[in-house]
Image (spheres, rainbow, N blue to C red):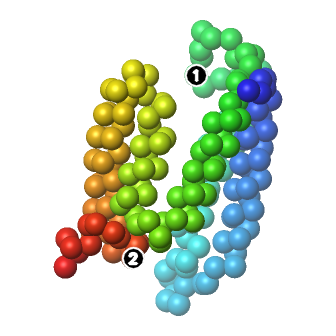
Amino acid sequence: MIKINSKKIVLFISIFFLGFLIFLFYETTNMSKSILPGYPGDAFFPRLILIFSLFWTSIFLFQNLIKNLSLFKSSEDKEKDIEIYFKDIIFLFFISIIYILFLDLIGFEILTFFFLFVLLVNRLDLNVGKSIIYSSLISFISMIIFWFVFIIFLKIPFSLKFLPFLLY
């Protein structure tokens, strides 16, 4: 566990995100122009989203730079430390890499179920039996929803193992 001052981490993240948004806005200059006169080119909607994000990120940054400026007042002390549990972050990174590497081999529906199950089982604040039951149920329902969205509606060609018969 790492403890970091909340004001410092918020300033770092907002400056980093602002720089990243400026870089992305610069990258939209390489997008193609409109082939029809009077219509926006390919960069129109990405720039709209980036301008919106830049606006709110800059407000968030200035709110944290100027001490008395605050859009939302809170009774909590803003100078407390944030605890970062690096073991949980490494675990999440590790199982995400496993999910990516074994998606073709094991199959979308099986691996998605186990991925969600592993993430949920230790997060639910219940005894072990209830946690396993609820995690299984939530993971299965979520997997079915993801299957419908990505496979049926969006027609993304993932590797399937036991639900492909519903495709045809």
Q: Is residue 163 visible?
A: yes
Point out the residue furthest to the bottom here: 35
Most foreground residue, 11 or 130: 130
> Within 10 Å of the Cα at label 2, are there few (<14), some (14-19), or many (20+) other Cα atoms?
few
Q: Residue at x 28, y 47 (%)?
A: 141
**Quarter of the view holding residue 86:** top right
The correct choice, above or below, for 12 with respect to 145 in the image is: above
Picture coordinates of residue 102 (x, y %)? 52, 65
The correct choice, above or below, for 101 with respect to 60 in the image is: below
Element at label 1: loop
Q: Is residue 64 visible?
A: no
Q: CA distance from mark 2 to mark 1?
A: 45 Å
Q: Residue at x 49, y 31 (%)?
A: 122
> Within 10 Å of the Cα at label 1, are there few (<14), some (14-19), or many (20+) other Cα atoms?
few
Most foreground residue, 133 or 43: 133
Q: Residue at x 47, y 70 (%)?
A: 105
Residue behind mark 2: 157
